[in-house]
Amino acid sequence: MIPMAPSDSQQEQHVVNHVMSAVHALQRVDDPRARLQMIEWSRRQLTTVEAETVADRYEAGDSDTQVEGLFTEDGQTSRNEAKKRASRGKAVNANPNIATKMRTGSLSTDQADVLADAASDTDGAAACDEELIESIEQSTPEQGRKKTNDWITKRKSNTEAETEHQRHHRLRNVYRTRSRNGLHRLVIEADETSIDRMEGKINAGADAEFEADGGRERSSSEHPRTHRQRQFDAVQKIFTTERTGTTARKRPAGIIHVTVTVDQLTGADSTVIRTADGKALPRTVVEELCCRSEFIGHIYSEIGETLWEGRRHRTVTRAQWTALVARDGGCQQCSKSHEHCVAHHIIPWSAPLAGETNIDNLVLLCEACHSRLHAQKLTLVRNIETRNWETRPATTHELPADAPPGRRRRRTKHPASARSKPRLDQRRKQHLTGALF
């Protein structure tokens, strides 16, 4: 039993006693899975009540600072946590239906937080868009975050994108600090496009370090450096390596994929231009990029899908890669940038079904999600209604025939006899109904 202060009412003490009785009852549940489900249900109910309480404070006229102070006054809650809980309540104040969905379980706490973040960036507008809310309900939190970003970007005008870019450019900054473990930090703050360029160059250098460590011919545990350590070493080389004056041509340091229509490029369409990941791109930046960029044309179907392109080898071509970036933008499980992704065969190349390297059998996945799918023996299925990629256990015909997770198969050509399988359209009809475009 939790002791209450003398000033607390008898009703409050009764509520606390009731809650503690429920907690003790949960501890007596023998099945761990059932106990965890009941704990999650209880947590969701309490989170909903908390959000409604915070919504009442906003309705009463409290400011963000006053509401956040309700959580931080005990000295045990971080500012970031207080902001998150306050934002959740603010979204409920804008749309009480969010609390109803949280209470019934159709909207999880993580999904509500995704919606609350979008509402904070749009003065509450995202919290009142029922179509967006329904879309988030049907998506994982990671997919939901990408959808809210797309929703926000589509509603930006070119003027708003330009103004935001110029403001971020004015605020560009570099400063030095230290972390709690004593490491020194060099923090760079800038507009999104500049950071994307820097990150692209760093990732290109990290890829070169990865190949120097043995590449995919060695498992992750055999590599002497982590990905972040290779990134740091790449940054250090960029800053410390002197130019030798050589005229040898090097590969591009980084690539920015921009999906733009002809009308947008000529100004006939005034909608904001976006990168492949869905970020708004100011027109002045696009004009600058056009001066030294390569244009690759893609033809789309009437519903916006990249038309089929395939080949008879396991690895994707450059044209296929750019088509995948244009279509997917990034990882279709966690929304990580395409810079960290690989082209995943939905039906593996070496599986009995002999998945081919065609656009309709490929999807972008980051390294972590790619390894998880193979390790857990899962396959991807496209939900036609929500257009989200979902996972299900792979059948024996959809599993790769060899190679343990984490070790890449050598790129060898398959003999013609190994490809004597039913046509891809027949296999798709038999086994992949609803899974592909």
Image (cartoon, grey):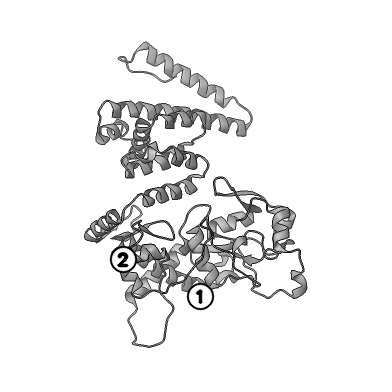
Q: Which one is in front, 431 or 212?
A: 431
At 47% from the left and 74% from the top, the residue drawn is 208
At 51% from the left and 45% from the top, the residue drawn is 140
User: With 55 as the anchor, is 375 left or right in this view?
Assistant: right
Residue 184 in the image: x percent, y percent? Answer: 31, 60
| In this rendering, the label closer to the viewer, 1 or 2 | 2
Q: Any mark on residue 212, and which?
A: 1
Residue 259 in the image: x percent, y percent? Answer: 43, 63
At 42% from the left and 47% from the top, the residue drawn is 148
Residue 294 in the image: x percent, y percent? Answer: 42, 74
Asked whether residue 221 is in view, the answer is no
**Location of mark 2 (residue):** 285
* Residue 198, picture quadrant: bottom left
Query: Label 1: few (<14), some or many (≥20) within 10 Å?
Result: few
User: With 402 as the anchor, is 305 left or right in this view?
Assistant: left
Looking at the rendered structure, the kind of residue marked 1 is Ala
